[in-house]
Amino acid sequence: MNELLATILICAATTAVPDCSRATAVDVITAPVPSLFACMMAGQLAPAHHQLLGDGRYPKVRCGDRAQVARR
């Protein structure tokens, strides 16, 4: 099985969702995950665990193999 990579972008509420990217994110978390479900769970758990949400911030989650994530 190919390992997926979860990329969680923490963006300011003043940034429109389509404009939230690595370049505009306040913080970026990446983590290897075994499945799409695990990726979506990481997208919720990692920002909460690191206390990165609040203060007008939201997470945007991207899931894909390492080559796909590197191209974004």
Image (tube, rainbow, N blue to C red):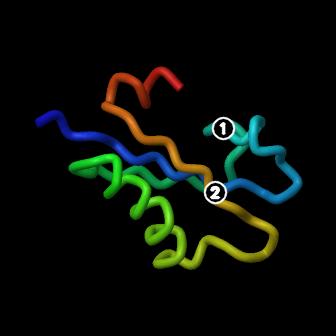
Neighbor class of circle 2 (other Cα within 10 Å; few <14, some 14-19, many 20+) is: many
Q: Which mark is residue 10?
A: 2
Q: Name the residue under label 1.
A: 21
- In-front residue for pair 54/36: 36
Kindly identify the amino acid type of the residue bearing the numbered disc 2: Ile
Going by the picture, which residue comes out furthest to the right? 14
Neighbor class of circle 1 (other Cα within 10 Å; few <14, some 14-19, many 20+) is: some
Question: SS for tag 2?
Answer: strand
Q: Where does residue 7 sit, x and y in percent of width and height?
A: 46, 46
Q: Which mark is residue 60?
A: none
Task: Kindly identify the residue that appears in the image at 83 percent across and 59 percent down.
Answer: 13
36 is higher (above) or lower (below) than 69: below
Task: Kindly identify the residue that appears in the image at 61 percent across and 71 percent down.
Answer: 52
59 is higher (above) or lower (below) than 25: below
Kindly identify the amino acid type of the residue bearing the numbered disc 1: Ser
**Residue 68 found in image quarter:** top left
Q: Where does residue 69 sit, x and y in percent of width and height?
A: 43, 31
